[in-house]
Image: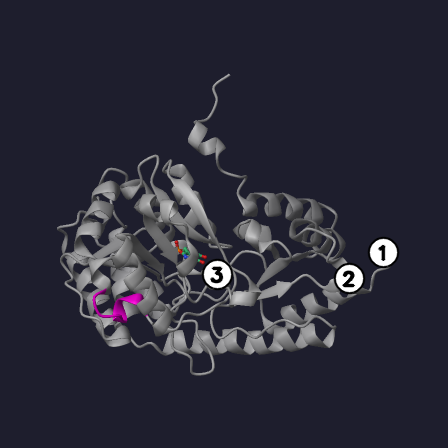
Amino acid sequence: MIEEADRMKRLPRYLFTIIDDLKRDAISKGLDILDLGMGNPDVPTPDHIVEELCSRAKEPENHRYSRTIDKSEHELKRTIANWYQKKFGVKLDSGTEVVPLIGSKEGIAHVSLAFLNNDDIALVPNPAYPVHFNGVLIAGGMLHNLPVSAENGFMPDLDNIPGDILKKSKMIFLSYPNNPTTAVATKEFYEKAVSFAKKNDIMLISDLAYSDIAFDGYRAPSVLEIPGAKDVAIEFHSLSKSYNMAGWRIGFAVGNAKLLSSLAKTKGYMDFGIFKPIQYAAIKALSGSQDCVNEQVKIYESRRDVMVKALSDIGWEVPKPKATFYLWARIPEKYSSLTSMEFVSLLIKEEGVVLSPGTGFGEGGEGFVRFALVEKEERLLEAAKRIKRVLDMKI
Ligand SMILES: Cc1ncc(COP(=O)(O)O)c(C=O)c1O
């Protein structure tokens, strides 16, 4: 029998594959699925972006392999640098400090491959977005969990990492606004993180996929706003959430030029860049009116308010996040003896309501579930109604 590589055996089965199996069973039993599991935006990509893709797709020149010296990539990098300057007041050299990606997940996975030797340690908060730790495992690196919990506002404690771990550490992953916990970082936290990274000669990887999805006037800062951050940091961005372009696969990394050149080198052996019409569409998205982003944020803000209230009305108190389109909820008391996976399975089997189990984001997520607010408000209310039936069940 031909076995898969040992490094793949280090990985758990991908959470969403397990959930998909449960969903399939529920569908086969005739249940209507209300899917608040995956963070997969439901609203279509804005028209002006789709139109740009369509017209660019008609130009034969854009059907060829995409090369880094192509006009589209130059223009995209310049657009990203301008967007950064406008949004965060951070100046970037578009030639050396910007790398477009086939979605930020691709870049995040490749950064571990680019930098980790077998006994190098990556510091990763737990729970976290799964690619932060799975990328490390695929690369053959070592993981050191930084536990986060409600008690510390889901922020890692950078002051109490053992010295022998720090000596072998090469990178730290941070991501705020956070998926799944919805925690947000202050600039003071980033200042501390940058000086921590410098002091210990560790690269700081910031994943800012949710920079735009912020509510009640809150603005999510970039770590690169901290003076000197570029000496040690790179930051990942995604167009998936801000512009509802999840299926298009486009994101980018910015920051330290030397670190980015290793990422680009690694990628260069793996892929041929991004389909050029998608690059042009991304240019349109980033350089055009941002009204579509603001409208999208309003939709998520309203969904957040509706769902937090609906859950409270059925006796499930869930904190109101400042950012992201998630709710991070402690499993209700009645079912607190179940694991998060058992609780999620119960909701799917009984009522077709799909949430993500906290442990899908690391064992530190046990006791929690994550709601992704990617259904319309009436469907969210329906979800709350169905959840109530499960909460009212005799057990
Ligand atoms: C924190 C975080 N980073 C990165 C990604 C991946 O985004 P992309 O679609 O750009 O690969 C996600 C997607 O859910 C995410 O939640």
The type of residue carrying mark 2 is Lys
First in sequence, mark 2 or 3: give its number: 3
Q: Quadrant of residue 328?
A: bottom right
Kindly give the residue lying farthest to the front in the view shown. 163
**Residue occupied by mark 2:** 334
**Residue occupied by mark 3:** 179
Kindly give the residue lying farthest to the bottom in the view shown. 217
Q: Are marks 2 and 3 in contact (CB under 8 Å)?
A: no
Residue 223 is covered by the magenta coloring? yes
Asked if the beta carbon under badge 3 is closer than 8 A to the nearest atom of ligand 1, the reply is yes
Q: Quadrant of the C terminus?
A: bottom right
The answer to which of 183 and 77 lies nearer the viewer is 183
In what quadrant does ligand 1 lie?
bottom left
First in sequence, mark 3 or 1: give its number: 3
Let me know if residue 58 appears in the view.
Answer: no
Tag count in the figure? 3
Q: Position of residue 134 (x, y in %)?
A: 44, 44
Q: Give the magenta range.
A: 222-228
Q: Are marks 2 and 1 in contact (CB under 8 Å)?
A: yes
Residue 55 relative to residue 121: left or right: left
Q: CA distance from mark 3 to mark 1?
A: 32 Å
Q: Quadrant of residue 268?
A: top left
Q: Position of residue 154 (x, y in %)?
A: 50, 64
Which labelled disc corresponds to residue 395? 1
- Residue depicted at 18% across the width and 49% down the height: 261
The type of residue carrying mark 3 is Asn
Give the number of the mark in front: 2 or 3: 2
| Circle 3 SS class | loop
